Image (cartoon, rainbow, N blue to C red):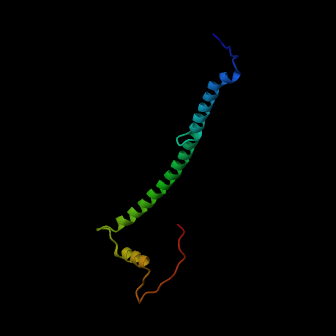
């Protein structure tokens, strides 16, 4: 019976730790740069802040529109105001009216 004795090489001892290092690097990279990683969380928080600012602006605009609509309801309807807004929206005047052009207000 023949037996061979092999000398242990360092390469065989490094295979498992090298594979573990590769797997840990893969998961570490995706923990930071992945779709649900740390870097993405910061981007999402910035996007949330931007969208909240837009929401505040839209809510403010909605309140202005609701106020204008409240003025047009029955009981508080002012004929002069309605006439003025209709003429401004349609850009029309009557034949016997004088138009004085003023600079537009900055909103």
Q: Can you tell which quarter of the image residue 8 is in?
A: top right
**Residue at image coords 52%, 81%:** 101
Residue drawn 60% across and 31% down?
Answer: 24
Q: Quadrant of residue 20?
A: top right
**Relative vertical location of residue 16 with respect to residue 39 in this rendering, above or below:** above
Residue 59 percent coordinates (x, y): 44, 56
Q: Residue at x 57, y 37 (%)?
A: 31
Q: Is residue 98 left or right of residue 37?
A: left
Q: Nearer the viewer, residue 33 or 91?
A: 33
Q: Position of residue 74 (x, y in %)?
A: 29, 68
Which of the pair 3/77 is nearer the observer? Answer: 3
Q: Nearer the viewer, residue 87 or 27?
A: 27
Residue 11, horizontal then vertical, whole percent? 69, 24
Callout count? 0
- What residue lies at 47% left-to-right and 84% top-to-bottom? 99
- Residue 11 position (above or below residue 46): above
60 up-or-down from 73: above or below: above
Q: Name the outermost residue toward the left.
A: 74
């Amino acid at each position: 019976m023949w037996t061979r004795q092999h000398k242990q090489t360092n390469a065989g001892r490094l295979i498992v730790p090298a594979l573990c290092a590769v797997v840990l690097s893969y998961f570490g990279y995706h923990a930071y740069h992945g779709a649900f990683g740390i870097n993405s969380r910061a981007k999402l928080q910035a996007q949330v802040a931007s969208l909240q600012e837009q929401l505040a602006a839209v809510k403010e605009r909605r309140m202005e529109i609701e106020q204008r609509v409240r003025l047009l309801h029955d009981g508080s309807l002012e004929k002069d105001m309605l006439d003025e807004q209709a003429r401004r929206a349609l850009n029309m005047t009557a034949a016997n009216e004088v138009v004085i052009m003023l600079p537009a207000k900055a909103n």
